[in-house]
Image (cartoon, rainbow, N blue to C red):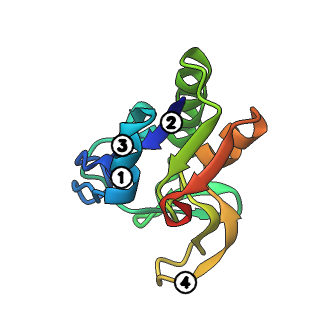
């Protein structure tokens, strides 16, 4: 099975602060599955490193109050294209992320508070009938 995976979970240095966050449980899946790494924020044209972003009223706003929703939406669309092209029916995404979070995301105040919600890419993948989960569910 091909599984779409947040590239940062495979150790790729693509997170906003320029690091990865290698998750051994996700990496172990490569023994039985093809892991397809994506970083929707990079696919949308954002640089690494980049200013942190949280979702506020459905918009992706960075800590400097710049709206980067268009880049987040483009990255989500590109991730869906890759998933469809490679027949990925499942995605394992980085928890709490404004792109990839699923179930919980940061509340938009940059205070570290989590609320119920979905990142832009997670929601878009789910709309296309791709099962979404986070690394916490492995």
First in residue order: circle 4 vs circle 3? 3
Name the disc covering residue 9, or none. Answer: 1
SS of the residue at dot 1?
A: helix
Residue that label 2 marks: 4
User: On the picture, is 9 further left or further right than 117?
Assistant: left
**Secondary structure under the numbered disc 2 in the rendered image:** strand
Coordinates of residue 92 in the picture (x, y in percent): 52, 48
Q: Residue furthest top?
A: 85
Identity of the residue furthest to the front in this view: 32
**Which residue, given by chain and number where applicable, does mark 3 sit on?**
7
Query: Would you call the spot at circle 3 few (<14 residues within 10 Å), some (14-19), or many (20 or more)?
Result: many
**Distance (Cα) linking label 2 and label 1:** 11 Å
Residue visible at 40% across and 52% down in the picture: 26
The location of residue 131, given as percent across then percent down, is 69, 43
Give the image location of residue 82, x and y in percent.
52, 22
Mark 1 and 3 residues: CB-CB less than 8 Å, in contact? yes
In front of the other: 38 or 27: 27
**Secondary-structure class at tag 3:** helix
Q: Which residue is mark 4?
A: 113
Q: Distance between the Cα atoms at labels 4 and 3?
A: 24 Å
Whether residue 27 appears in this view of the structure is yes
Q: Nearer the viewer, mark 4 or mark 2?
A: 2
Which quadrant would residue 101 be assigned to in this image? bottom right
Disc 4 from disc 1: Cα separation: 22 Å
Disc 4 to disc 2, how far (Cα)? 27 Å
Residue 7: where, in percent of width, then height? 36, 43
The label nearer to you, 4 versus 3, is: 3
In this view, 43 is above or below 91: above
Report whether 9 appears left or right of 98: left
The Cα–Cα distance between marks 1 and 3, rounded to whole angstroms, is 5 Å
């Amino acid at each position: 099975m091909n599984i779409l995976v947040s590239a940062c979970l495979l150790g790729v240095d693509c997170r906003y602060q320029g690091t990865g966050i290698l998750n051994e449980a996700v990496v172990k899946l490569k023994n039985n599955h093809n892991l397809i790494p994506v970083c929707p924020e990079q696919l949308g044209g954002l640089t690494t490193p980049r200013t942190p972003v949280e979702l506020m009223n459905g918009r992706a706003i960075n800590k400097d109050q710049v709206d980067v929703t268009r880049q987040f939406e483009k990255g989500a669309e590109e991730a869906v294209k890759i998933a469809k092209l490679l027949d990925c029916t499942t995605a394992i995404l980085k928890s709490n992320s404004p792109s990839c979070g699923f179930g919980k995301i940061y509340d938009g105040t940059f205070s570290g508070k989590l609320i119920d919600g979905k990142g832009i890419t997670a929601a878009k993948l789910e709309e296309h009938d791709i099962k979404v989960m986070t690394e916490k569910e492995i």
